[in-house]
């Protein structure tokens, strides 16, 4: 409050000091006066000894005769004291963003926060704002970056090197980040309330599959809140090192959890089935896909969805969260990282794709066991065979008609219960930088059976 009223204080005190010579102090105390002026005291008293403030600036221009040298004593004329006690300094109206109603915790998991940035707000008042679309300046910068990225694509040699054995690069990632790659996803139960339901004491037998479990970022927090004696969590990853880390963790409990190596995009072959160890078709209640599909090449989406479809019970859920198109992480990519449109290779050799909301709705809503993936992926397959066969990269893949798309959704294997875009503006108040983040979050349900119909009535 001092900072917002300094000018008013300076004017009031300096005016009375100069005209009435009421402030008397020693020369030594000119550089630090004890001052209190902002709230009337409950009993008569001087203006001293409550708030310390470097007040020597108020006395610039006063002659020596106007200052009385007594040992560190400040006195105020009673009339002046009465005025200063009765006059209230101007108060700035509370900022809109300080309204408690604007910062309530959300109850809808797909609301994604309630701190809205409105016209007239100071964007640097908080570190983060919800639901903020990128401004024109950032959009222009992003388009410039995309153009530069396309000019310097990953070489065919590196494209094949990174795509042929992605598990190798994830193994290296976990080995190089042993000390800091575990992040407790405390937000899970809020984002996906069904995870709270399956851990309830009376939930009964529940099977949860986490795909791309990594270091157990989801599985371990889920078990930490579990009260269901019949819960079973299968945590799978195609990195052998990640699975090793989970199994060696002190949080690993074989009664409730199993960790195995599994490639979600695997196809049945000579070595056996493409499903995870210990699981059979139609045995899973919930599949968790958090930042998993972005690590797959687009030509792997179809087999991955097929495996998930086979594993789920009728009415089973898919909980999905991944990177959104236009996210700061995409815009920041430098030359030599562009694999295909919206598909990049990181510096550590791992891949990342950035999704669009409509793309995900069509991907999951139109997929069927008979016809597979119904969305075009163009040259984004990024495989050696595709690279050899493609003739004109500039020619876009053919888009299905609106009628065909709706028909595919009506006959799709999954119902899209929720599909949201989580946008956030992160600001650095020190450097005045604005950083736009974007994530996709979905809740899909396998069609079929009475269980699915009952579950549809309450989408979480």
Image (spheres, rainbow, N blue to C red):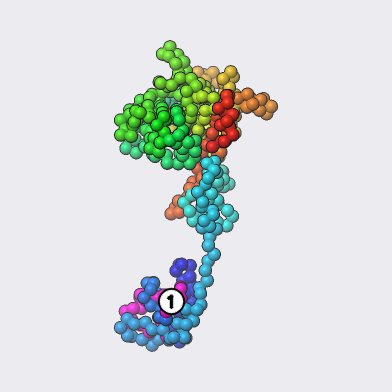
Q: Which residue is mark 1?
A: 41
**Membership of 133 in magenta stretch:** no
Main secondary structure of the magenta stretch:
loop
Q: Is 127 positioned to the left or the right of 412 in the image? A: left
Question: What span is in magenta?
Answer: 22-43
Q: Give the residue at x 49% y 81%.
A: 83
- Residue 170 pos. (x, y %): 39, 29
336 or 70: nearer the viewer: 70
Q: Is 403 positioned to the left or the right of 182 in the image? A: right
- Number of numbered discs: 1
Q: Give the residue at x 57% y 28%.
A: 452
Q: Is residue 459 visible?
A: yes
Q: Give the residue at x 41% y 75%.
A: 36
Quadrant showing the C terminus: top right
Q: Is residue 229 above or below residue 63?
A: above
- Residue 192 pos. (x, y %): 49, 37
Picture quadrant where residue 402 is located: top right
Q: Give the residue at x 38% y 37%.
A: 224
Q: Is residue 221 above or below residue 80?
A: above
């Amino acid at each position: 409050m001092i900072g917002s009223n300094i000018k008013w204080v300076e004017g009031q005190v300096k005016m009375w000091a100069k005209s009435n010579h009421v402030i008397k102090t020693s020369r030594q105390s000119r550089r630090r006066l004890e001052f209190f002026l902002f709230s009337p005291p409950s009993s008569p008293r001087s203006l001293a000894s409550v708030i310390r403030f470097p007040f020597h600036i108020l006395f610039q221009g006063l002659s020596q005769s106007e200052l009385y040298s007594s040992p560190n004593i400040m006195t105020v004329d009673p009339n002046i004291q009465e005025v200063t006690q009765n006059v209230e300094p101007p108060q700035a109206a509370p900022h809109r963003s300080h309204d408690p109603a604007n910062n309530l915790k959300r109850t809808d998991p797909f609301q994604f926060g309630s701190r809205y940035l409105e016209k007239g707000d100071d964007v640097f008042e908080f570190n983060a704002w919800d639901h903020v679309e990128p401004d024109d300046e950032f959009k222009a910068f992003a388009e410039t970056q995309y153009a530069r990225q396309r000019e310097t694509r990953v070489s065919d040699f590196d494209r094949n090197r990174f795509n042929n054995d992605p598990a190798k690069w994830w193994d290296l990632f976990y080995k190089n980040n042993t000390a800091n790659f575990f992040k407790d996803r405390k937000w899970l139960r809020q984002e996906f309330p069904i995870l709270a339901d399956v851990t309830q004491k009376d939930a009964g037998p529940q099977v949860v599959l986490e795909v791309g479990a990594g270091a157990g970022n989801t599985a371990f927090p889920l078990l930490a809140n579990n009260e269901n004696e019949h819960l079973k969590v299968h945590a799978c990853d195609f990195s052998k090192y990640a699975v090793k880390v989970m199994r060696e963790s002190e949080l690993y409990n074989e009664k409730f959890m199993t960790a195995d190596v599994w490639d979600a995009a695997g196809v049945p072959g000579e070595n056996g089935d493409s499903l995870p160890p210990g699981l059979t078709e139609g045995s899973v209640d919930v599949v968790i896909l958090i930042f998993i599909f972005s690590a797959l090449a687009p030509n792997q989406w179809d087999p991955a969805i097929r495996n998930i479809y086979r594993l789920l019970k009728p009415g089973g859920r898919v909980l999905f969260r991944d990177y959104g198109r236009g996210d700061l992480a995409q815009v920041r990519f430098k030359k030599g990282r562009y694999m295909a449109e919206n598909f990049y290779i990181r510096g550590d050799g791992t891949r990342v794709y950035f999704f669009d909301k409509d793309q995900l709705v069509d991907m999951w809503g139109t997929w069927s066991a008979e016809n597979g993936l119904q969305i075009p992926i163009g040259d984004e397959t990024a495989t050696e065979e595709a690279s050899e066969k493609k003739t004109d990269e500039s020619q876009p893949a053919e888009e299905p008609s609106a009628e065909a798309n709706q028909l595919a959704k009506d006959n799709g294997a999954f119902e899209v219960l929720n599909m949201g875009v989580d946008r956030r503006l992160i600001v650095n108040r020190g450097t005045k930088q604005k950083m736009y983040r974007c994530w996709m979050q979905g809740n899909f349900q396998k069609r079929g059976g009475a269980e699915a119909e009952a579950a549809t009535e309450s989408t979480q």
